[in-house]
Amino acid sequence: MPTIALPLLVFLIAACALIVHVARYWRPSACASSVAATVLLVSATRNASTDAFEFFGLSFAMQPLARDFLLAAMALSGILAIATCFGESRRTLGFLFWSWIVWAIALLVNDFVVGVFTWAAGLATMVLAMEPRRVQRVGGAAYYLVLIIIASAMLLLGHRFVQLYPLTPDQTSLIELSILFLTWGLGLLLGIVPFLVWLGPMADESPLPILAVLLGLGQPIGFWLLYQLIGQYPRLIELSNLLAILGYGGIAAIVVGSALASLERRAGRLMSFAALYALGFVLLDLSRGTLDGMTNAVLEIFARAVGLTLMAASITIARTVQNRWVNPVAVVVFIFGALNLAGIAPGIALATRWNLLLELEATDARLFYLAMASTIGVLIGTARFVMQWLAQFEPMPRRATEYNPLPLSGKPLPLLTRARAGVQRRVTAFGICLARRVPPPVRRIARGIAREWRAVAGTALLVALALFLLYYNAMPNIWAEHALEATQQLPFLR
């Protein structure tokens, strides 16, 4: 495949989002368009050009780490879109791709202000996919939309203060004010303690695929913008306690996220609080201020996104395709995703988490035992939800597949209806003639697949997700080396 220019990549994302949004009304077209969009966007991102270009005075370039993040984002968003196709309501299908039009710009542009605007625009787009449940009261979606506006203003104020510092180097208070507004803005959008008031209500009103994309893929863009700003103004770390703030925020997120997750039986809130728990380890890795810490943070972010995707996809498929063999497979995939999110799945997730825990044990044993004990909270919440899920599962009655014509009325049928019925009779007769030439065992299997095609496709997708997780965790050294190489090429770390 030829090299794809960056403007063409953004155009392809917009075109795929539009096609998927229009094709959502008919399930076969929605599934086909989601699969085609996923394959096309992953291939286009993989072959995107690394050449920088200028547009209205702004510089755009594809960094290796940004490419890896976009590859993961396109693949995981496509998986969630395919899982959404199994349901009767596919209103939110296009929103899984709409936000990436502006989020891709946030990852490509070399300007903090434009990055903040595009990041906030993508988060606001995800709010449009939420489903408010309160008629006369403000819900989680409205809370989050207001906080997006407030947090964006705080981030821009922090950027302005750090811009003014080189003009008056003796005014170190400008750096302190910049760190204050930057941490407030990022804390509001990331849901870090104590800014997590919106996290639970927003989870109640968000479809699970939307929630997984927002938390697993949308939130980490804020870290990219922050470290891009640090690369332009290294004084942010040298003259402030930013790393200490990240460390304290990580410890609080781990403890509070684990405690809240242990009390939840609702899927959305469980995913949100477990994601908050995993976000705490990302903050602790970043607080180390080293290349190894940055590499581990990248791996933690990817493991967090994969875990949320598996949890959301398994619940979505199990709720829409209730079948005697789909539900056990969905439960297993959900548990795999929860263990990966908790950092105890054997493989790269466990290796990354254990590397951080060993460093905590060497510096402060109390933090080590606190992080280990907090893992139990996520496991308790997962076990409570799985037990409730299994207890409430009841197979739906099998739908009748035979043709039951309506009783004839005195009025003649329209011409179009009679023509369509004639075509259906001829197609059915042709199918019967072909079926007589097929062996009976093959005929029974084909009838079963035709009757339960959603169950077969859903099971295949769940099995593919489980195999991918096993493949992902089976080669920790390869993923760690790749993350290290991509991180070393970041401009602000050179």
Image (tube, rainbow, N blue to C red):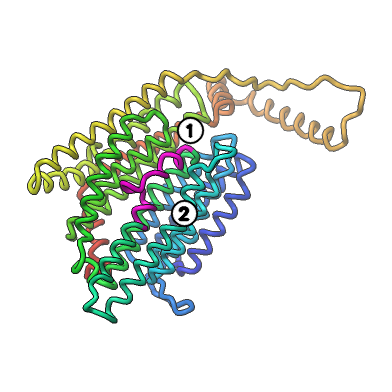
**Label 1 crowd bin: few (<14), some (14–19), many (20+), radius 10 Å:** many
Residue in the foreground of this view, choosing between 150 and 192: 150
Q: Which mark is residue 317?
A: 1
At horizontal 25% and vertical 37% (from top left) the residue drawn is: 345
Query: Is residue 478 in view?
Result: no
Q: Nearer the viewer, mark 1 or mark 2?
A: 2
Disc 1 secondary structure class: helix
Tell which circle, 1 or 2, labels the residue nearer the N-terminal end.
2
In whole angstroms, how far apart are the C-alphas of marks 1 and 2? Answer: 25 Å
Q: How many marks?
A: 2
**Quarter of the figure with residue 163:** bottom left
Q: Which residues are magenta?
A: 185-204
Question: In the image, 228: left or right of 427?
Answer: left
Where does the image place residue 313, in percent across and percent down from the top left?
Answer: 44, 37
Residue in the foreground of this view, choosing between 439 and 428: 428
Amino acid at dot 2: Leu
Disc 2 secondary structure class: helix
Overall secondary structure of the magenta section? helix
Seen in the picture, residue 373 relative to 436 is either above or below; the reply is below
At horizontal 29% and vertical 47% (from top left) the residue drawn is: 279
Question: In the image, 106: left or right of 249?
Answer: right
The residue where tag 2 is placed is: 123
**Label 2 crowd bin: few (<14), some (14–19), many (20+), radius 10 Å:** many
Where does the image place residue 169, in percent across and percent down from the top left?
Answer: 23, 79
